Amino acid sequence: MKATCRFTLAALALAAIAVGACTKRDDAAAAPPTAAEAKQFLDGVNDSMKRLEIEQNQAGWVQQNFITDDTEAIQARVNQRVTDAIAKYAKEAARFDKVDVPPDQRRQLNLLKLSLVMVTPSDPKEGEELTTIMARLESTYGKGKWCADPSKTDTCMNIDAITKVMAESRDAAKLQQAWEGWHTISPPMRKDYARFVSLSNKGARELGFADTGAMWRQKYDMPPDAFMKELDRQWDQVRPLYLKLHAYVRMKLHEKYGDVVPATGPIPAHLLGNIWAQDWSNVYPLVAPKNADPGYSLDDILKQRKTPPLDMVHAGERFYSSLGFAPLPKTFWERSLFVRPKDRDVVCHASAWDIDLETDIRIKMCIDPTAEDFTTIHHELGHNYYQRAYDMQPVLFRDSANDGFHEAIGDTIALSVTPEYLVKIGLLGKAPDASRDIGLLMKRALEKVAFLPFGLLIDQWRWKVFSGEIAPADYNKAWWDLRLKYQGVAPPSARGEEYFDPGAKYHVPDNTPYTRYFLADILQFQFHRSLSQTAGCTLPLHRCSIYESKPAGAKLNAMLSLGQSKPWPEALAVMTGTKQMDASAIIDYFAPLDKWLDEQLKGSKTGW
Ligand SMILES: [Zn+2]
């Protein structure tokens, strides 16, 4: 009878039933499960998950490459089956909590229990209520629109249109109107969100976690409270640089907008070029240093040469080959999407895929001959090489060391796309001298340094909401307290509890954990510094590229191939020699900008 518990069934639905059947039988017998059964269970899950994930990847690929009602329906069905299966397996894994199993199996069982972002309570009525609420939250956000004049539909703006206004307009009144407009989509979510918190906490407690936030933090291979302290420690490392950037940008915005921007207080959240003030790149023209033009434009070079998209991808592949990675498989070139098709709708947002969890890796991008796309290709391929490196691991280990690592790897490689690298590959004649670096560093800081406090505070808010420390009656107040504390931004007008401003950020109604983006932002600089040292780079850190360094490639590969088979501090140590995340690499990287900011601020007060 045990053979039926091996989940060698092709169809997921059947496999899921098999798991349930095993549970029932063992419960009825009341015999404690054995180590052999745990092993058998994991073998079955790895086998079943592989089939399911392949099916999910195929459905997802087709849906994003051929957007129709039918492909969307097919994908939604597969997604539901995968979610249901993981939920069953996660609950099943808890049976083996007290069984003595080898460490790698214990890790697989733990990962399985932690693979869900949300646990549905076992009470079917509550489970259904939670599913319905989640669908409603997502669609409220997805359909979110603000109409300047509700009687005229052509005045309605979705998030894309709002994003464009926030990026391009320099009219403070218009920006405030658009900002307040977008934040009208979320008050209807408030009641649903409070109910979602209570129901998802109930599910998390059934799996043995204190609440949903504690379950999220448990993923990071350390006690949840220690992890929170660790994040604070990293933030303290970069905070002085953030404060200077904040004070400098505030000074320039004050020059531009006058008293709308206080000379010493928080920056109004609607004037930073982004609806969430999480990326300030769009205000670069307002804060650009003088004489900081790098003296070349990769955009122009790629356009002048009419560089075909495929050539840009080949350049990306050559980067990884120069580190010692094997060439991409033939199927990558045959099956990837590189250009926007003329005959159909596709999702053009760049992504990297690992269809069969083995060799069938692909990217999906609509490549234009731009500097941004050239860098993005290097980033996406980073995901692909990571996926291929861990394909020898059990399926449950085929992911990055923690959820910050995958994004960090792509971005690490993107940091190596330097002027010197462009010279080496023949795209640029001569690298600009160091006096031009401030402009490039400023642009990068507006994106990466400005993001850090935002990347941190979303989950600071959510963890407190899940734990009950923030009550529903204080949702909005607590949100703005955190935004002031970390980002030093303030809303353009009073925001009482009649609003629900967290809901205007996609990841809140969508319930996607956010700390990973903070971690990725920190890690990429630590990776870059460590690999640059291995590559023997003696230039300032922001000028280093690991291109052509086989020793750097070997270290990178040693970490990538671990997947998530080891706790992330061990994976980190394999590549960098340290088990601790270290934000000081950001300080090193931006050192010239830091010095320049000191000169601009001339001792004037930072902070708010
Ligand atoms: Zn990515």
Image (spheres, grey):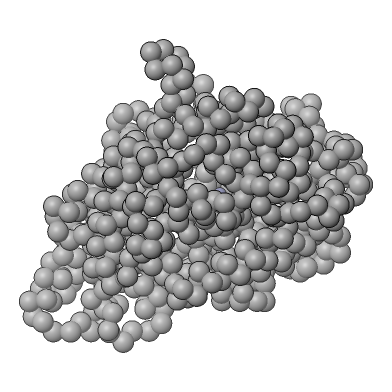
Tell whether 345 sits left or right of 138: right
In the rendered image, the residue lying farthest to the bottom is 100
- For the point 32% across and 70% down, the residue is 210
Tell whether 161 sits left or right of 542: left
- For the point 66% across and 52% down, the residue is 608
- For the point 75% across and 61% down, the residue is 587
Q: Position of residue 218 (x, y in %)?
A: 41, 70
Asked whether the viewer can see residue 518, the reply is yes
Looking at the picture, does residue 531 appear above or below residue 512? Answer: below
Q: Position of residue 121 (x, y in %)?
A: 21, 59
Asked whether the viewer can see residue 314, the reply is no
Q: Position of residue 474 (x, y in %)?
A: 39, 52
Q: Where is residue 138, by image quadrant?
A: top left
Tell whether 134 sits left or right of 19: right
Looking at the picture, does residue 444 appear above or below residue 405? Answer: above
Tell whether 190 sits left or right of 64: left
Q: Where is residue 374, by image quadrant?
A: top right
Q: Position of residue 462 (x, y in %)?
A: 42, 56
Task: Classify the position of the N terminus by image quarter.
Answer: bottom left
- For the point 66% across and 56% down, the residue is 412
Q: How many marks?
A: 0
